[in-house]
């Protein structure tokens, strides 16, 4: 038997506990107004379906940077600024409105060796989308800032995890070493002309014309792609609609308040070598929003296609984890 000092044993136990999954209780508050309109009212090119704020006593809950479906019955997962997966299930009321986030579990994102990411420089996960096979979610694809890279993680029982499987990306992306590098990551659905390809859009890496640089990763459809730069806001997440059109979420800060915009790019414009522009679907600023960073397209329990937009509170007490849902007006 080897005797160790008690403080060392306690430290080792703490490390083991931190490396594992943590079940978290999350409470919610209803959001029934947006930009002065109530539930089911039109706002710009969308219809407001409600929302919620999320809170937890667990200090590892927060920093929700991107979100994606991970299974049936509204199973979803977020990635966070501190290198965690936050998975659970969206709950809805009898009127098909967001009610809560239940069954929440926080798991550390692992490196390719199956160990938790060793330092904050490697943990800043910002983009994520789901890989589907035969209609089933089998993995998530995650993009990281600072130590810029893309990696896949298997899904088991609706929760992503396990060892990272890194995906090759162009050298110009690898060379980006800031927290404003690879923000938006999404995978084209079967209806898209570039079905199966991954769209990557950088936040602050601009081309010679001042537009955002991007890249398509695919077998046939691959190569550079651009996205029109807009004043104040930068791209922070993306998601495809079922018909192949691409939604791009933008956020920024103006006069000490957050600003956001959501644009829709026709499917035909999402192709190698093209500069995407997009039509404005929604804009907001001030108290109606927060630091809106995550975007997801999914189906509500009632079968309606919903656009889910969430905020990253950066683990700050003065910011919110705000979740909003909209439907298309068409």
Image (spheres, rainbow, N blue to C red):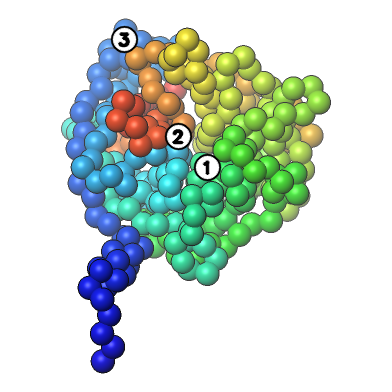
* Residue pointed to by mark 3: 37
Q: Residue 233, image x and y in percent?
A: 56, 20
Outermost residue on the top side: it is 36
According to the image, label 2 marks what residue? 294
Q: Is residue 302 above or below residue 45?
A: below
Q: Is residue 283 visible?
A: no
Relative side of 72 to 296, left or right: left
Kindly identify the residue that appears in the image at 54 percent across and 24 percent down: 250
Residue closer to the observer: 317 or 297: 317
Q: Is residue 2 visible?
A: yes
Q: Which residue is mark 1?
A: 127
Q: Residue at horizontal 19%, vertical 37%?
A: 27
SS category of the residue bearing label 3: loop
Mark with earlier residue (3, 2): 3
Closer to the camera, 137 or 1?
1
- Dot 1 crowding, Cα within 10 Å, few <14, some 14–19, many 20+: many
Instruction: Give the CA separation, mark 1 to mark 2.
Output: 8 Å
Q: Is residue 102 left or right of residue 218?
A: left
Q: Residues within 10 Å of mark 2 (few under 14, many from 20)?
A: many
User: How far across and how far down the image is residue 157, in percent?
Assistant: 35, 61
Q: Residue at x 39, y 47 (%)?
A: 77
């Amino acid at each position: 038997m080897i005797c160790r000092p008690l403080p060392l044993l306690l430290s080792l136990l703490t490390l083991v506990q931190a490396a594992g999954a943590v079940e978290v209780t999350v409470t919610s508050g209803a959001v029934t107004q947006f930009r002065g309109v109530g539930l089911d009212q039109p706002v710009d090119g969308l219809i407001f379906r409600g929302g919620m704020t999320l809170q937890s006593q667990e200090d590892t809950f927060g920093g929700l940077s991107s979100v994606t479906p991970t299974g049936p019955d509204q199973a979803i997962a977020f990635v966070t600024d501190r290198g965690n997966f936050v998975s659970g299930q969206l709950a809805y009321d009898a009127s098909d409105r967001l009610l809560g986030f239940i069954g929440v579990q926080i798991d550390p994102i692992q490196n390719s060796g199956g160990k938790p990411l060793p330092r904050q420089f490697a943990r800043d996960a910002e983009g994520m989308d789901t890989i589907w096979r035969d209609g089933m979610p089998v993995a998530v694809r995650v993009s990281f800032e600072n130590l810029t890279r893309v990696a896949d993680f298997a899904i088991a029982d609706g929760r992503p995890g396990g060892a990272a499987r890194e995906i090759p990306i162009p050298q110009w992306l690898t060379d980006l070493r800031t927290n404003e590098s690879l923000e938006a990551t999404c995978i084209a659905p079967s209806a898209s002309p570039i079905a199966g390809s991954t769209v990557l859009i950088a936040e602050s890496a601009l081309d010679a014309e001042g537009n955002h640089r991007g890249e398509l990763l695919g077998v046939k459809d691959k190569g550079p792609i651009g996205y029109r730069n807009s004043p104040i806001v930068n791209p922070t997440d993306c998601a495809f609609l079922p018909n192949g059109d691409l939604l791009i979420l933008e956020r920024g800060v103006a006069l000490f308040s957050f600003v956001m915009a959501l644009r829709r790019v026709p499917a035909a414009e999402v192709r190698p070598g093209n500069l995407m522009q997009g039509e404005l679907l929604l804009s907001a600023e001030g108290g109606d929003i927060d630091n809106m960073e995550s975007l997801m397209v999914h189906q509500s329990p009632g079968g309606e296609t919903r656009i889910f937009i969430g905020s990253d509170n950066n683990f700050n007490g003065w910011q919110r984890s705000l979740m909003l849902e909209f439907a298309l007006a068409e």
